[in-house]
Image (cartoon, grey):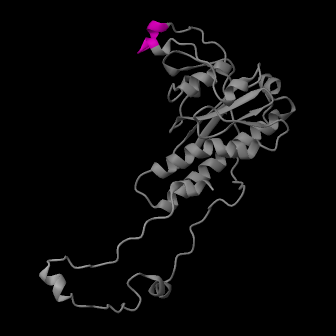
Amino acid sequence: MSVPLSPWATEVFGKQALAVRVGLGQALRNMQANAQAAQEQTDSRTNHTYGSARWQGQFERVWEELKDLPGAVPVKPFGFPFELVIVGRGLIYPFLYSKTKSDVRTARIPRESRLVRELFTFAPEPAHVQDAFDFDGFGESGEVVEPRGALASVPSGTRLILVPFACNASELLEAHWGIAALGAERRLEWETEPEPLPLPDTVTSHGQRLMTIPKQPTASELELTSFDGGAEPTLTLSSRANVDQQRDVPPLTEAEPADDQTSEDDANH
């Protein structure tokens, strides 16, 4: 059964609203699958690889799924390694709000960074506007935040669309989207009811991302490539001249290293 679109989604994304909703759900499914594949390939006892791949994927997979929509534009915030996406009048910001199922209406932004404060200049004003004495280190937090980089050229009237999702290394649990203000203690004050995003069961792939563990060499192949599997080298020994021994000249055990003719600048050419 198809879930009807809310008026706010149609207002922000226009005719692309349904495609955006479908694309966001698919992007998060792909994000989870890629992060799990990366974790499995490392065979690590920690989930650091999963976490890093998931963080990267929550932005890159969204762009992959939405980039072909008419009017989709990438936006790279100042000092941020990934691009966000604008479709219609919606600036999309996905983020992990929980590693377990929990009420998204009580969700918090994980960290109130300078980027987050810049993004929320495109969001509604909170019910209670914090003054300088509401913050730790009020001298810095009380400043007026202006968007930098590509965010500074975002068209007037653009709205921040939040995409909070819950997942862990085992499964993608749930995802929502909606519009909210940033309230006290990083709490979200929802202007719209946070709506569930449908999450597909299947994974789509764009490009040549690694999806399986490469074929490992057999024991016979290793015998030909292992550093200790070849023939022993022939060593040439020579005695030191008597004059060197009398003058206490240290023996020369290996050739002097040649000067390195390359530099880091070569990578830029």
Is residue 123 depicted above or below 53 in this figure? above
Residue in front for this viewpoint, 149 or 170: 149
Residue in front for this viewpoint, 198 or 261: 261
- Which residue is farthest left? 246
Residue in front for this viewpoint, 168 or 142: 142
Is 137 left or right of 82, judged from the image as shown? Answer: left
Query: On the image, which quarter does residue 44 sit in?
Result: bottom left
Q: Is residue 165 magenta?
A: no
Locate residue 112, reporting x and y percent.
51, 24
Q: Is residue 135 magenta?
A: yes
Locate residue 121, reporting x and y percent.
64, 19
Is 30 left or right of 133, judged from the image as shown? Answer: right
Q: Which span of residues is magenta-colored?
A: 132-139
Residue plotted at (57% across, 26% down)? 116
Locate residue 146, reporting x and y percent.
62, 19
Locate residue 9, reporting x and y percent.
78, 27
Residue 159 seen in this snapshot: yes
Name the dominant secondary structure of the magenta segment. Answer: helix
Residue plotted at (45% across, 61% down)? 43
Residue 199 seen in this snapshot: no
Q: On the rendered image, what quadrant is the C terminus found in?
A: bottom right
